[in-house]
Image: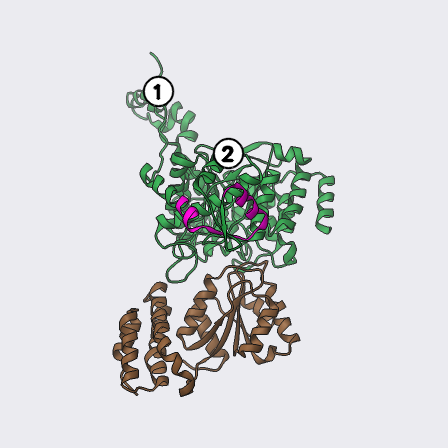
Amino acid sequence: MKPLDIPTFQPRLKVLNREQALVIHAAALEILEKTGFKMEHSGALEMLSDAGCRVSDGDWVRLPAYLAEEALSSAPRQIALYDQQGNKTMPLRDGNSFYGTGSDATFTLDMETGQRRRTVLRDAANFARLVDGLENIAFAMSMANPEDVPVEDIYVRVFAEMIRNTNKPMVFIADSGKDIARIYEIACLVAGGEAEFQRKPFILNYSEPISPLRFPANVVEKLIFCAEKKIPICFPSGTNAGGGAPVTLAGAMALGIAENLVGLVVHQLAGKGSPFLFGPNVSVLDMKSTVVSYGCPEWSLTQAALADMRDEIYGLPTWAYAGASDAKVMDAQAGAEAMFSIVTAMLSRSNLIHDVAFLEFGSTSSLEMLTMANELIAMSRFFTTGIPVNEETLALEAIERVAGGGPGSMFLMDDHTFEHFEQAQFLPKLLDRSRYDSWEEAGAMDLYKRCNIEAKRILAEHQVAPKSEEVLHEIERILQG
Amino acid sequence: MSDFKALAEAVTKGDIKTAVAETQKALDSGSNVQDILDNGLIATMDEVGERFSKGLIFVPQMLRSARTMQECMKLLQPLFQESDVTSKGKVLIGTVKGDLHDIGKNLVSMMMEGAGFTITDLGVDVAPEKFVQKVQEVEPDIVGMSALLSTTMPSMPLTIEALQKAEIRDKVKIMIGGAPVTEKYAQEIKADSYASDAGSAVTKAKELLGIRG
């Protein structure tokens, strides 16, 4: 008999139809042609003008649609991010989803006291090390905006600290063209030279213009630097519905995409074919607290919509968020909100998904939250893999053996179970399924406590393959200089 | 004191047309400008602010009321000088040098105006020298500074320093706010007050100037 060979359907979330996607895209182009935008970088202004944009009032630019379409067609359809040892660990294409942390938290939940306190450089190190040790966290961001570092050096110092503590790919922040050049110098050192870095890039820059439609010089400076050096970049503005953008999600998306397209056009003019990760941040401004929500359903909805637009129109890998919360502590709200965004981001096939382990709408980071999210991502991955249907998984022979096997015969004893249970089931490590008495005996710990212990264990035991003495020495020299 | 029930209701609902008509009616019937301002508009906005703080209404509703009040103020303002109207205090506000993010600052301005303060908004990316110049010109009671980025926060102490050098630091109270700003930071740079959001900015401003309620 010919073995069954049925492809496995993998659950996929769609939230926009093709017509909706095309109309939002058209609206974005209309914003650029009719409304225009404020470009405060003189070099970019000149490039745009030379390329066919109309410039008025000094720095107000109107961009014809064909320029956006041209940029969309010259940007690469896939971005491969490597780890720091040269392995291609993050092929950003198709429906691949990769999760990582966020940047610049002002506070962190202290692992020893449980209290919220200002972040320090040591926190960036701890988060990078924990990311390195968690199998489902693919890349690192700083999770700290340290108070014990001179402000002008924050991003370089944080970057160096992360380099010392992880070998995974990194998404980094810089302030301007000055510190990004130093960061790039460090990255090239680690890669073994500029050519090596460009062949196997392991960093991606995060820069953002200001909604609505304002492009500050220092932000565009970084965009052009990345385009010229072929450093992958994302350029998501905060077109949060009701804040930087209209309160209705379609308009907020159109505005965010318009701003992203401006970035893409400048980027492709400065470095045709350089890698650009597409997508704005479209969350909501909370109508009571005026904070930008990190636990709302809207953000998950708009990034799912963006993934649909990628498939229908853009073809460029997308930028997304998940695993964060507005809760102040890692409580039930934090778990619910984190899981909601993690599973929907994966189901909608967002590509690079950041902000995992943020609490308090991105103001506070938590090592425990990151440890929990690692397991929630595994749970989502299991779900998204679907149900393989074949001879082995239908297990008709096992059914016959057990059902016809007489007294004492059971599936738990059958070879089929022994051979398959590790793939057939999701086996949680931190989510507790123990019986009440054993749970009580083990200390009656809630998930926060269990994550705290696990995070401490990983930080104590996990070995990060060190950089060479020479590289470390050179990094130190760059930091001093 | 006149009865401003209809005016109060219109401001609360954010019904600009009715509120402006009611303000005109009050003026026509000879009500005192200070009375309309204090007991018609500011008292209503205090209540709106209170309802907002309790989470009973949302930001757009509160802002619509504030805008309604602004429209009514346009009728009153020309009469201020002749009738010697007093405001709760003068506030000079702006985002600090290097920072172009202004949603938070705009919210604070609107709420303070609603509470009866007179606002001079310097906009975004305001250099220390500009703060100094404007303080000398406007003579405000309070200077409000906002920063969204940790990289622009150092412009706050620089501005305070510039005010010191110009020997006008002690003539004003300094309030700061913005995402990365903390109470501790306010103490470090010797600002007089820190507010975590627009609502508490009003409360803190009143405290600084010793205004009750």
Residue stretch rendered in magenta on the structure: A29-52
Q: Position of residue A192 (x, y in %)?
A: 69, 35
Eye-nearest disc, 2 or 1: 2
In the rendered image, is residue A426 in sight?
Answer: no
Position in image of residue B163 (x %, y %): 62, 74
Q: What residue sits right under mark 1 in the picture? A: A391
Chain coloured green: which letter? A
Task: Kindly state the secondary structure of the residue where label 1 is placed.
Answer: helix
Q: Is residue A183 magenta?
A: no
Quickly name the residue at label 2.
A74
Visual hue assigned to chain B:
brown
**What secondary structure is the stretch in magenta mostly built from?**
helix
Which disc is residue B152 wearing?
none
The one nearer the camera, B186 or A330, is: B186
Residue type highlighted by circle 2: Ser
* Disc 2 chain ID: A
Give the Cα separation between the discs numbered 2 and 1.
Answer: 46 Å
* Sequence-wise first label, 2 or 1: 2
| Colouring scheme, one of rainbow, by chain, secondary structure, one colour | by chain
Q: Residue at x 35, y 79 (%)?
A: B43
Q: Chain of mark 1?
A: A
Q: Residue at x 35, y 72 (%)?
A: B71
Q: Nearer the viewer, residue A405 or A235?
A: A235
Q: Position of residue A293 (x, y in %)?
A: 42, 54
